[in-house]
Amino acid sequence: MTPDLGSPGPERPPHFTDDAWIEVLSAVDRTYADLVVYQEQLERQNAELEEMRTFLTAILSSVSDVLIVVDRAGRIAQVSRSVTALTGCSEATALGRPLSEMFDPADAAPLAGLMQMVRDRRRSAGLEINLRTASGTEPLDLSIAPRLDDRGRVDGFVLTGRPLGALRRAYADLSESHDALKTTQAQLVRNEKLASLGRLLAGVAHELNNPISFVYANAHALERYAAKFETYFGRVQEGAGREELIALRQSLRLDRELANLREAIQGARDGAERVRDIVEDLRRLSSDGSGETVVFDLAETVRIAASWVLRGMKQPVALVMDPLPSVQVRGRVGHVQQVVMNLVQNSVDALEGHEGAEIRLSIGTGAGHAVLTVADNGPGVPPEVRGAIFDPFFTTKPVGRGTGLGLSISHKIAQEHGGSLTLAEGGPGACFRLELPLAGGAP
């Protein structure tokens, strides 16, 4: 037998040429290359999915609000770490549970109805609901949004909620801070007013000393007159004769002293009334004005506040008051008095050492507002400080001469009254305009 020298391999079909085999091999190479590209795409997509998963996990772990993802059947598919922290149950325990078990049983019906409405309308909705926690319940402001699939059908829900307990505590803290701010502001107004009153002590002492001295002198005169009348009536009671009483009356000058007695009584009454008026002006001037708003005469308030400032000043300043018409405004009298005192005091300080110093006050009305202007003929306000003149603690006075709060507080008071305080343009000196709403609207 002839030895087998090896199999020659499968023979090519007779109809396959070399070009055909080359084309088949090329197709195999292309298919392999496509598979490699597809594998790379899968790897990139897997990496992106893993990155997205890590990102979502980080969100679910760090979000402070409640976040619950629910599937179409109403079972929990995912929760944030804040949910497990509030409820005290683990993520594994929460997943797959019916959503209703997470909330108070009394809220089950409203929650189911709202979810059905969200499913039908495909629009977010919200309600206040109580989340069951380890220590009881926690009120939530819950928002429910539909979760749609690629065909636009509702495939579940996304629930987000913020614990209202924290919000209410934050609101309480904010309210407390606001009350403290109002108290501080009122205290600043009182302190500024006391500082203004401190500058008026010399004028107050002078104003009180004159009528009190007058009353004191008349009291001594009345005491002297009383002694003379006691002497005369004592002799009458003792039975003195008519001639003796006539002589005694002439020696004591009772007829003249009787006329003087009436003058002394009238003088004492006038002095006491003057003291009463001064004390009443001071009482109104020093009131903190923190009560209810009232309707009052702006002209009378301006007159009292301005006159007391000028009583306490040391340099000669002419106060020119145009005929101040009676204008009724609504507000807190004490606060408005403080504004007027601050404006007049600023003008007095600006006019220190100025020849022919003059402050002019005028009151008008317009557009439903009463307008008070306080103008002086001093050096005015430099342009570079006009923008900061109403800023707190801003002052151009030397150290110890001012707190820098007067104009700032006055500006705030005007705004709280529904008006404004502005620095008018032009004029030889400074001119401030205080606008306050009229009590009855437009005149």
Image (cartoon, helix red, strand yellow):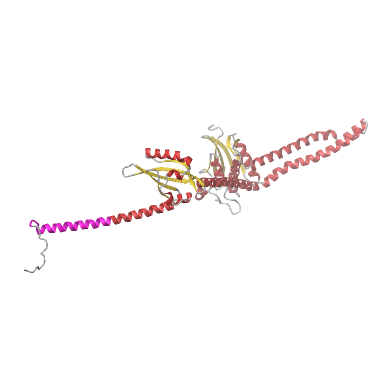
Q: Nearer the viewer, residue 27 or 346?
A: 27
Q: Which of 337 and 308 is in front in this view?
A: 337
In the orientation shown, which residue stands out farthest toward the top?
A: 242
- For residue 326, above or below residue 352: above
- For residue 384, above or below residue 414: below
Please indicate whether residue 114 sits to the left or right of residue 179 in the image. Answer: left
Residue appearing at x 55%, y 41% in the figure: 416
- For residue 253, above or below residue 341: above
Any magenta on residue 30?
Answer: yes
| Quadrant location of the N terminus in the rendered image | bottom left
Answer with the quarter of the image where residue 252 lies.
top right
Any magenta on residue 376?
Answer: no
Q: Nearer the viewer, residue 405 or 428?
A: 405
Location of residue 198 in the rendering, given as x and y in whole percent from the top left corner: 65, 48
| Quadrant location of the C terminus in the rendered image | top right
In the orientation shown, which residue stands out farthest toward the front?
A: 1
Q: Using the rendered image of the protein, determine whether residue 377 is visible from the camera's viewpoint.
A: no
Location of residue 191 in the rendering, given as x and y in whole percent from the top left corner: 62, 48
Please indicate whether residue 267 sits to the left or right of residue 193 in the image. Answer: right
Residue bounds of the magenta highlight: 14-41
Residue appearing at x 71%, y 43% in the figure: 208
